[in-house]
Amino acid sequence: MAMTKVVYRNVQTFNRDVPAGSDDEEVYTSLVFRRTDKSILAQDGQIQHFGLYKLAVVFLGLLCVFLLAIITGLSIMITEGGQQLQDCYISQAEINATTQERDELYKSFTNLVKEKSQVQDSYNQLCEEKSQLEAACSTTAEERDELRIQLTKLESMKNVKRYIVRVTLDPDTAHPNLILSADGKQVRLGDKQQHVNHNPKRFNAVPCVLGKEGFSSVRFYYEVQVSQKMCWDIGVARESIKRRGNINYSTKNGFWITMMRGNKYFAPEIVANPLSLKEKPQRVGVFVDYEAGLVSFYDADSWHHIHSFTGVSFIEKLYPFLSTCAIVNQIPMTISSPVKSYC
């Protein structure tokens, strides 16, 4: 379109200068067209150069934009890289701090392990001390209970022995085979009968003897030495007991005694169940509370309780009673002398 406008303008110019129908018209026309062609070509070349220039400019613009984009991207990358480097630096610092904290925690843990070991040792020691203390407390408690028992025994013994009396054996009641000492404190069984006077109070079949004095409405206590004896009967009997022929020991028949046979101890009503004694008594104590209806037997040395009869209704005098059994033995049974400190 631009080329047409140029040709047209040139033709109009030529027409104004050259008269129509002249021979020069063709020549001029040819010249004009040649000039026009050259102009057109020149203009086409300019147009082409201008297009190339525009393309170059566009290309340079795009290249600038591209370079700018690259520079911007590089700047961003550099900035982000710097930030990342900074972040890496901060992370490393945090790692260092964490490492230090870990080391401190490990050190604290090591110290705690050591302290735990020390605490465990202390705990074990305390447990051992606790066990020792418990054992000591148990021993102390046992000793305390034993002391209380002993104190109770001592109080009981003190109270009982306040009523100790002098007992003298009555020769008029002694079996003919019994041998009494001159003072009436000892008795033993001989191997033959003695010449004795006839007396209705005398035992004639069982080797027994009574004390001279009877007791009623009072409390009394006496002791008999029985060491090395293998058989004995000790206690109290009422005045009206059977004395002739064989005797059946029982409370119903008026006998409140304990018996020893071959290191076993019995009461008349419980012969099938021996009494429990920790050790063999060397002295047997007999305590009677007449009004309370009580007869009790003790190991006079350890004050171990042997046996008691309770709830008895006494209506007659009670006499100390001893029997050597039917075993001949030269070792006598001896009435112990009163101990004044308990009176």
Image (cartoon, helix red, strand yellow):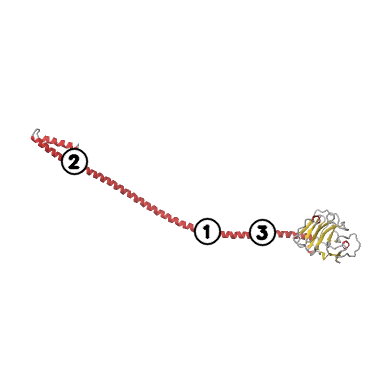
Task: Tell me, yes or no, whether the two marked residues, 2 and 3, touch with CB atoms within 8 Å.
Answer: no
Q: Nearer the viewer, mark 2 or mark 3?
A: 2
Q: CA distance from mark 2 to mark 3?
A: 131 Å
Q: Position of residue 119 (x, y in %)?
A: 56, 59
- Specify the quadrant that holds the N terminus: top left
Q: Which residue is mark 1?
A: 113
Q: Position of residue 66 (x, y in %)?
A: 29, 46
Residue 174 occupies quadrant: bottom right
For the C terminus, give its image quadrant. bottom right
CA distance for labels 3 and 1: 36 Å
Looking at the image, the residue that sits furthest to the right is 198
- Rendered residue at 57%/60% (across/down): 122
Amino acid type of the residue that numbered disc 2 sits on in the rendered structure: Asp
- Which amino acid lies under the numbered mark 3 shown in the image of this protein? Ser
Task: Label 2, secondary structure: give it.
Answer: helix
Left/right placement of residue 92 relative to residue 71 reads right
Q: Residue at x 45, y 56 (%)?
A: 99
